Image (cartoon, grey):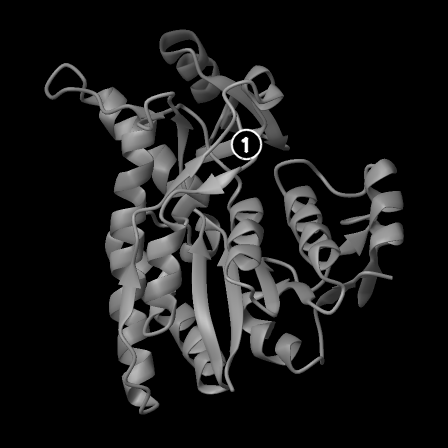
Amino acid sequence: MSHKIVVAFGGKELQSARNIASAEDQIKVVKDLAEKLAEISARGYDLGIVHGNGPQVGRIMLASETSKDITPQMPFDVCGAMSQGYIGYHIQQALKYALNLRGINVPVVSVATQIIVDEKDPAFNNPTKPIGPHYTEEQANEYKEKLGYDIVNDAPGSFRRIVASPMPKKIVEIASIKQLWEKCVVICCGGGGIPVIENADGTYTGVEAVIDKDHSAELLAENVSAEVLIILTDVEKVSLNYGKENQVDLDKLNLKEASKYIEEGQFPAGNMLPKVEACMRFVRSNPTKKAIITSLDKVVDALDGKTGTVFSFA
């Protein structure tokens, strides 16, 4: 009997260390990612994939804004849908090839996924989610003045645009995703999903926001009754005092410990915090389930219990 697993990774994990933003460079990175995902599938997991889109959707939006005098500017939700399409396309191609090499004849499909958010979510009054490229201070000030961006200084000498990050409430296409899951590897909730408001007449309206892909991945994992949620990032384990001389890497975290460290401010908002919160919510939903945070290159070892930070109920 196969087991269901949801694997989530950020948009920056789709970029190379050279940080070249071309489609060709992303394809090279995705091919390496696909090898790891195919290995997970080969171990008997029914695989669902959730990708981020922070750098990608930011570039799409910036291109749309820059060319607005030539062609109509696209709203943010449409830019998010565009990112789902091209990132999903890259993953589909690379993963299908990697699966074929292992003799796994399973289709790979991408679902343009809408996710309902609450229009009264307080996140709309407190943007925290970084998107797009890193700017110099001079560039950041220019975009803030000309385009009205909310900007945050997220690292020494580095500035990024931030937008609201409301919590996901419901996956609109969940029924279709469940049906596809039985026969396919499903790529869905890309970029955290296209954030929409549900109207009284049953229609949906897109809103300018980015849903954190970690929270959407957790919601998906619950909806499909997955046994494992694994969130990939650029570090092998969750750490206390990250980047300091007294940094401590954590092999395990239970709900009580994780809550304590959150109160202490150990996990930065918009970075490690949503990953930790998503893992906590998943194991809280069912104490028998497993949530793991680790790096892409260690994902198979983490599934084998050799590394990563494993979350438990108690």
The vertical placement of 242 against 296, above or below, is above
Q: Residue furthest front?
A: 201
Q: Residue at x 52, y 64 (%)?
A: 6
The reply, left or right, for residue 27 in relation to residue 211 is left
Q: Amino acid at mark 1?
A: Lys
Q: Residue at x 55, y 30 (%)?
A: 166
Total numbered circles: 1
| Residue in view at x 32 percent, y 22 percent | 201
What residue would you read off at disc 1?
Answer: 129
Measuring from the top left, give residue 12's x and y in whole percent. 47, 50
Q: Which residue ends up furthest to the top in the rendered image?
A: 145
* 198 in relation to 147, above or below: below
Image quarter (top left, top right, bottom left or bottom right) of the C terminus = bottom right
Query: Which of the two residues, 153 or 115, is positioned nearer the viewer here?
Result: 115
Spot occupied by residue 138 in the image (x, y as percentages of width and height): 47, 18
Residue 16 visible in the current orientation: no
The image shows residue 190 at horizontal and vertical percentages of: 39, 49
Horizontal and vertical percent for residue 47?
Answer: 45, 71
Residue 37 seen: yes
Q: Quadrant of residue 234?
A: bottom right
